[in-house]
Amino acid sequence: MSKSISGFSKLSKAKKIDWIVTTYFSDSEEARKIIEQYWNTDAKVQKLHDEFIENTITNYYLPLGVAPNFLINDKLYTIPMAIEESSVVAAASKAAKFWLNRGGFKTKVYSTIKIGQVHFMFHGDFNKLRTFFNNIKPQLLKETASITKNMEARGGGILDIELRDKTSDIKGYYQLHVSFETLDAMGANFINSCLEQLAKTLQTEALNFELFSETERRIDVVMSILSNYVPECLVRAEVSCAVEDLTENDAISGEAFARKFVQAVAIAEVEPYRAVTHNKGIMNGIDAVVLATGNDFRAVEAGVHAYASRTGRYRSLTHAKLEDGRFYFWIEIPLALGTVGGLTQLHPLVKLALELLHHPTARDLMQIVAVAGLAQNFAALRSLTTTGIQKGHMKMHLMNILNQFGANEDEKQALTEYFKSHTVSHNAVSDALHILRSKT
Ligand code: MEV
């Protein structure tokens, strides 16, 4: 039976681990060994990780892979990807190579506007609230000046503040709907600090606004927070080529492949069951780069899926068409990313990933991430509409299965060779390993 504990966060790391291993594990020394096995041998690096979050007991590793040969706006990139799924990096690399010989990826950022809101309740005359808001707008900006000063010096800051009437949704509900430019910072802390100051000013000024009645003076702020829905922080990535160049082998003509590919995308545009899986494949590429570059993948996921549903139906994030003998495939996706602040200056691997990407600005990174998503989707659809996904997937998964069976290096080598010409499945690997072992 596990038990509750108070003051856990105040215990030393050693004491926390003592409590965990003795409370939850039948073999507490084995559990301790696993926890300690993942500590960094450099005490400074470990301390850094310990301090990222509360109650760190160890580190959780994911592989960091790289996908080379990405030609983006005529510049070559090797893209870092942190992900556990066997086939993702291989698929990205394959797609990069395919498009390297066909002009590469073209990208553009439409805008980088981010949104934050002060949600508040006001019970009274909307016309008076509007007059009040127009009167205090300069004051709202003035009182955030100490927070926005540095950002403004670099060309960013608060772009606009709007008063929004939301009373048709909830009685008495209004918003300050604020747009921001945060340049190379993801900007969550900056935006939230601005919003909390705006909320304070709003409430204080209301107390002194002479047109308000006693009730109207009491503006009730419910919360002040940035939005992870960033439909205006939008980037596009595209590939295109002549239809006849769309194939590398004789198994399927460029024309036939292009038609099937466009059909597959069309299905994901109208069929939510397919669209979710289609977009999940895109997120395989996106999340992996977002994570490797120290960005908040939960924020990106939330924003992207909301964007995919913006018409009222969940749809594909990518689009494809055939026009005048050319194949076009593109993605438009909202991505609020940062390349300064947060983990970017702290995590040694994040710093390394950003250097590998030639120290990108946030706008550069948006384009690289969008390309990773498009490439991943291209690779998935290419397999799905030709050989089927399992062939490549299981090939990549083979090493995981061999590791599950405790195969040694010689066995791995022999069976990797064997499965070049045989279909991989859990049973097939088990049988082949059994036969191999019985021979030795
Ligand atoms: C698997 O992680 C992703 C795919 O299912 C994506 C897709 O179906 O498009 C292969």
Image (cartoon, rainbow, N blue to C red):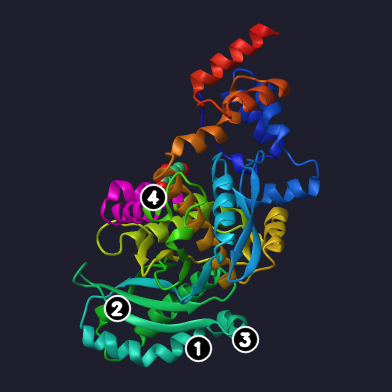
Q: Which residue is mark 2?
A: 164
Residue that numbered label 4 is attached to: 278
Q: Which comes before the other along the chain, label 3 or label 1?
A: 1
Q: Nearer the viewer, mark 2 or mark 4?
A: 4
Q: Position of residue 346 (x, y in %)?
A: 70, 59
- Choose top left, top right, bottom left or bottom right for residue 221: bottom left
What residue type is disc 4 on? His
Q: Quadrant of the C terminus?
A: top right
- Determine whether the beta carbon of the residue marked 2 sits less than 8 angstroms from the nearest atom of ligand 1: no
**The quarter of the picture showing ligand 1:** top left
The residue drawn where x is 52% and y is 52% is 285
**Mark 4 or 1: the one toward you:** 4
Q: Specify the amino acid type for callout 1.
A: Lys
Q: Main secondary structure of the magenta part?
A: helix
Q: Is mark 4 within 8 Å of ligand 1?
A: yes
Mark 4 vs mark 1, CA separation in Å: 47 Å
Q: CA distance from mark 2 to mark 4?
A: 36 Å
Q: Residues within 10 Å of mark 4 (few under 14, many from 20)?
A: many
Q: Which residues are magenta?
A: 258-281
Q: Nearer the viewer, residue 2 or 260?
A: 260
- 313 left or right, relative to 142: left
In the image, 404 versus 143, the foreground residue is 404
Crowd tier of the residue under label 2, counting other residues whose Cα lies within 10 Å: few below 14, some 14–19, many 20 or above: some
The circle on residue 153 is 3
Task: Say which residue label 1 marks.
Answer: 142
Local packing at callout 1 (Cα closer than 10 Å; few below 14, some 14-19, many 20+) is some
Helix or strand or loop: what does disc 4 sit on? helix
Helix or strand or loop: what does disc 3 sit on? helix
Check contact, mark 3 vs mark 1: CB within 8 A: no
Identify the residue at the far front of this view: 250
**Cα–Cα gap, marks 3 and 1:** 15 Å
128 up-or-down from 215: above or below: below
